[in-house]
Amino acid sequence: MDNIKTSHSTAGQDHGHGEGGVPFFPDHFVKEMSVMALIFGVVLFLATLMPMPVGEPADALKTPPGIKPEWYFMTVYQMLKYVPKSAGLVFSFVIFPPVMMLFPFFYNWYTKYRYGRLILHTIVALGVLTAIFLAMLAYLGFE
Amino acid sequence: MKLGVVDFLDERFDARRVAKEFAEHRVPDHVNWLYCFGGITFLCFIIQAITGVLLAFYYQPTTDAAYRSILMIMDDMPFGVMLRSLHAWTANLMILMVTLHMLRVFFHGAYRPPRELNWVTGVLLFFMTVTFGFSGYLLPMNQLSFWATKVGSEIAGGLPLVGHYIQAFLLGGEKISDATLSRFYAIHVIILPITLTMLLVAHFLMVRKQGIADPL
Ligand code: HEM
């Protein structure tokens, strides 16, 4: 329970009153609006200069050369080339999602160890780099 | 007696106090530009909702008509090219931003107690955002749509034991047909928008209640 007390100072009803920080309005609000304008600019720019092509109509008999998934599926797609297929699928769809979802509930357990959190964050950082690397391989069409 | 809109709302909903509390709540000093990504994801979702509804005015979810309706959107609908391109680009941006938001939260350790449940909501939001992308990709019924869905559903079909059932459930049969398009459309424009909105409400209420986490 100690962690609940020490890991934050503003939970509960007292949140957002009194000490520290800047008021949401106008200080922070102005920044949010600037970011919003920037994002509008970015998507309008992309949509204007690179409009979506319509493409060829779907044809079940004509396999197009070099099919690749959308970029956000490329990591899984590439990984499945290197590991046994069923193992890769069980990892990606059965093991990974619940672990990713539930690990914070074990926080008090793994932080009992001196470098528990540091080790976890390092593993995930390496995992992220590997994911980016695999996606790049897929993008370049490596077998 | 002069009664303005603000007075009207104030008498009924205590609007002044609510607005004042929201306007004056403090944003901690350690908040920097890395904290933008959640808000940008939300902005993307709003852009998607608006452009998506407008596209739905013209889009027709049958294998016969889908491709033609996209041509109509591109050639005849006022601002059709702009709407469709905005929807497609913002979809990609939203997935990128939700990923960056998640990494930001992770490496700041903002998942730790008492914010575990907000992390859980977040993970669900992440998978739903990606599913938005997957289901939307089939809708134009072009070559890319067709083959991405075919390969994607075959990959899911490779899961031991349940794979075949999942694939049949996704496609509504053995292969891509009207049944597939109908269910992808229902998932894309009804199921995901409603569930994602409900989870977002929970997500934002939790952020307000618990405040932004202190740095590690
Ligand atoms: C549709 C997707 C999502 C939207 C629109 C969204 C939006 C937001 C916003 C606006 C905040 C306020 C702080 C910030 O922006 O950094 C926030 C905080 C938070 N989000 Fe999300 N989020 C989404 C998905 C996720 C995901 C995928 C995760 C993690 C798996 C997540 C976990 C959290 C947590 C733990 C906080 C509290 C952070 C803190 O206290 O510093 N969210 N979210």
Image (spheres, coloured by chain):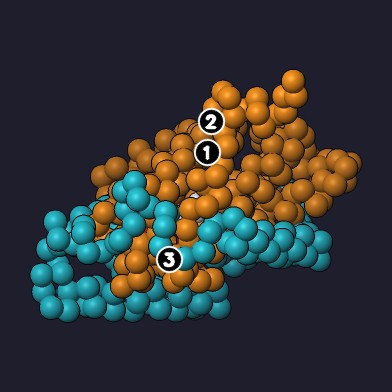
Chain colours: A cyan, B orange
Which labelled disc corresponds to residue B153?
none
* Left or right relative to B107: residue B40: right
* Left or right relative to B156: residue B75: right
Q: Which amino acid type is marked by label 2?
A: Asp
Badge 1 marks a residue whose secondary structure is: helix
Q: Quadrant of residue B71?
A: top right
**Looking at the image, is A9 positioned above or below residue B122?**
below
Query: Could you tell me if the residues under marks 3 and 2 are in contact, i.e. CB atoms within 8 Å?
Result: no
Q: Residue sitting at 53 percent across and 59 percent down? A: A23
| Chain under callout 1 | B
Number of marks in the rendered image: 3
- Image coords of residue B86 (percent x, y): 72, 54
Distance between the alpha carbons at the discs numbered 2 and 1: 6 Å
Query: Could you tell me if the residues under marks 2 and 1 are in contact, i.e. CB atoms within 8 Å?
Result: yes
| Residue of label 1 | B17
Q: Residue sitting at 71 percent across and 61 percent down? A: A37
| Residue of label 3 | A20
Q: Residue sitting at 51 percent across and 34 percent down? A: B194
**Looking at the image, is B168 positioned above or below residue B127?**
above
| Residue of label 2 | B14
Crowding around mark 2 (Cα neighbors within 10 Å: few <14, some 14 to 19, many 20+) is few
On the same chain, marks 1 and 3? The answer is no
Observer-nearest of A21 and B36: A21
Distance between the alpha carbons at the discs numbered 3 and 2: 27 Å
Badge 3 marks a residue whose secondary structure is: loop
Q: Which amino acid type is marked by label 1?
A: Arg
Quadrant in which ligand 1 is drawn: bottom left
> Would residue B177 be seen by someone viewing this image from the given angle?
no
Q: Quadrant of residue B51?
A: top right
| Chain under callout 2 | B
Crowding around mark 1 (Cα neighbors within 10 Å: few <14, some 14 to 19, many 20+) is few
